[in-house]
Image (tube, rainbow, N blue to C red):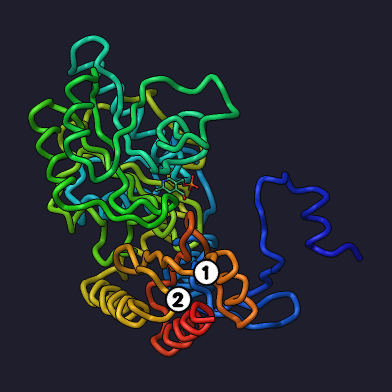
Amino acid sequence: MISTKQNDKNYVASTYARFDLEITRGKGSLVYDSEGREYIDLSSGIATNTFGMCDSEWTEAVTRQLSLFQHTSNLYYSEPCATLARMLSERTGAKKVFFSNSGAEANECAIKVARKWARENKPEGHNTIITLKNSFHGRTVTTLSATGQDTFHTDFHPFTEGFVYAEANNSQALVELVKSTPCCAIMVELVQGEGGVMALDGEFVDTVKALAREHELLIIVDEVQTGNGRCGSLYAYMQYGLTPDVVTTAKGLGGGLPIGATMMFDRVEGTLTPGSHGSTFGGNPVSCAAAISVLKRIDDTLLADVRRKSEYIKKALTGAKGIKSVSGLGLMLGIETERDAGEIIRECMELGVLPIKAKHKVRLLPALNIPDELLQRAIDVIKTVAAR
Ligand SMILES: Cc1ncc(COP(=O)(O)O)c(C=O)c1O
């Protein structure tokens, strides 16, 4: 029989540099490979399996909905979609929510909202969106344009126009860019995930707020990776005293099923009108049931626990041999190591621990409910490997 790895190599588009590891099952923060080896999962499907693998409450919510109906078109009402929108609105103050299937789509929607809002509210031509250098907003042609990294702008011309890039944490440069650009919005990740787990400074975010107020710009916060408890608050913007106009999220919201959400606050609540946007699978009842079960469990107790675990990791690793720095918020952390991060990750894997990479850092995105005992074991392995 041809192996999974061989079938994958033969037939799956070669867009991923996969590790030599086939995951066959998992429970909580433990996953198992095709040879039955056990690993502590420190990336949870890139910030997606919020409560780990096959969490019983999540599985129960998903299977209950599956036995009722798996999908209906957006021509009809469905309870999970409406309930999830209400829950998100009550927890954030958003006035309307558009559901899609991924982070990139959530951002596409946000960009469309900003452009339509600009057409209706700004002088002609003021439709540029300022994003940050080193950001990551997705893989569609437009979200690649929004992504402020040259490496993503080489292969797929022509790209969508109307994006300029400001240096993160450089307030003066942002002020100048806003003054010289006919813009309508500033779009940020509060912790740049793919860009190397870099949190924005409070002072820089204050500048974003002030400029948005002064120049009547929308603030779009991409919480695809930072959201849904990951950073120790329901959404990271809540730690920055920010009042956004649009918040996008995906990844951890579904706890392992695909869903994207674009939350629209007061100023843009009426921007999307019938026919202006849509999605066949957006608001899928099974994904929404999964998200409802995830959101219900992101309470103050869980969030305090995320912050406690974050502190534990930072304390354990800061100043340890072979470790230069630890960055990030909550359970979205980047470790700068003296040795090459790729080597550290490979050696951790050999010892049964699965972190991933972000630029030159080792990135940790464990399930929010990872048991202390597993977390400690995994951190000890990282320390041992980094010290070699
Ligand atoms: C901040 C951010 N935005 C957007 C995306 C794209 O999300 P998706 O892969 O679900 O389209 C990602 C994915 O890593 C992300 O981290």
Contact flag, marks 1 and 2 (Cβ < 8 Å): yes
Q: Residues within 10 Å of mark 2 (few under 14, many from 20)?
A: some
Q: Name the spot of residue 261 as percent of width and height, x first.
A: 37, 46
Amino acid identity at mark 2: Gly
- Residue at x 18%, y 46% (from the top left corner): 205
Judge by depth and name the residue closer to the eye, 277 or 285.
277
Tag 1 residue: 339
Looking at the image, residue 194 sits to the left or right of residue 162; the answer is right
Q: Is residue 269 visible?
A: no
Amino acid identity at mark 1: Arg
Looking at the image, residue 192 sits to the left or right of residue 35; the answer is left
- Residue at x 37%, y 64% (from the top left corner): 332
Say above or below: 125 vs 88. above
**Quadrant of the rendered image containing residue 347:** bottom right
Q: Name the spot of residue 244 as percent of width and height, x first.
A: 19, 42
| Secondary structure category for the residue under label 1 | loop
Q: Is residue 35 visible?
A: yes
Q: Residues within 10 Å of mark 1 (few under 14, many from 20)?
A: some
Tag 2 residue: 322
- Residue at x 49%, y 64% (from the top left corner): 62
Total residue callouts: 2
Looking at the image, residue 6 sits to the left or right of residue 181; the answer is right
Q: Name the spot of residue 42 as percent of width and height, x first.
A: 49, 72
On residue 124, which mark appears?
A: none
